[in-house]
Image: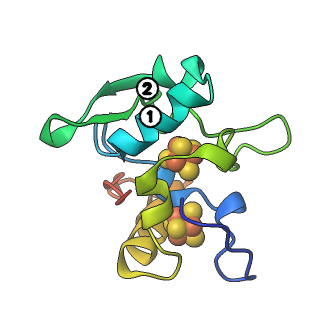
Amino acid sequence: MSTPHTSSTFDCRSCAACCHARPGTILVSSEDLVRWRREGREDILNGLMEGHFSESAFAMRPDDVCIHLGTPASSKDCSIYDTRGYSCHALQPGSRQCLEARRERSTSDTARVGPPGLGKSEPAT
Ligand code: SF4
Ligand code: SF4
């Protein structure tokens, strides 16, 4: 999920396709870590896992969804939106990676209720 974008086409806060990913791939930066320490966000710091490239990453739920996805109001909104990580900002709505994530998420949703043979793929972050 990227920067605030509320166009009718790419409303991240009701999409969240790129919050579904392989474990260890939604990376956080050293600047994120410093900011969360400064903000006293032990909850976020304690919710990290070892990511790819020896970096830290958001931990994932068993269904390969970021542990921070979901608020009392919406299952597709980010619960730490105001202080989410750099990779969440970096993925631009409407970009190739965004479109791939949305397409693959759509395919995955279809697979749950549709015919066999359509499997879950791995959306970009
Ligand atoms: S897939 Fe695109 S529109 Fe959806 S949350 Fe990510 S950046 Fe936003
Ligand atoms: S921190 Fe928020 S925006 Fe980033 S992947 Fe997790 S739920 Fe999505």
- The structure residue drawn at horizontal position 60% and vertical position 24%, both measured from the top left corner, is 41
Three-letter amino acid code at the position of disc 2: Pro
Image quarter of the C terminus = bottom left
Residue 114 makes an appearance in the image:
no
Q: Is mark 1 within 8 Å of ligand 2?
A: no
Q: Which residue is mark 1?
A: 34
Residue name at image x 47 percent, y 16 percent: 46
Residues packed near mark 1 inside 10 Å, few (<14), some (14 to 19) or many (20 plus): few
Q: Position of residue 15 (x, y in %)?
A: 63, 62
Q: Are marks 2 and 1 in contact (CB under 8 Å)?
A: no
User: Does the beta carbon of the residue at mark 2 sit less than 8 Å from ligand 2?
Assistant: no
Give the number of the mark in front: 2 or 1.
Answer: 1
Tell me residue 113's x, y (percent). 56, 52
Residue 46 appearing in the image: yes
Cα distance in 3D space between marks 2 and 1: 28 Å
Side of 100 where 77 appears, left or right: right
Dividing the picture into quadrants, the one containing residue 50 is: top left
Determine whether 76 is above or below 11 in the image.
Answer: above
Query: At 43% across and 31% down in the image, what residue appears?
Result: 60
- 60 with respect to 5 (left or right): left
Residue hosting label 2 = 62
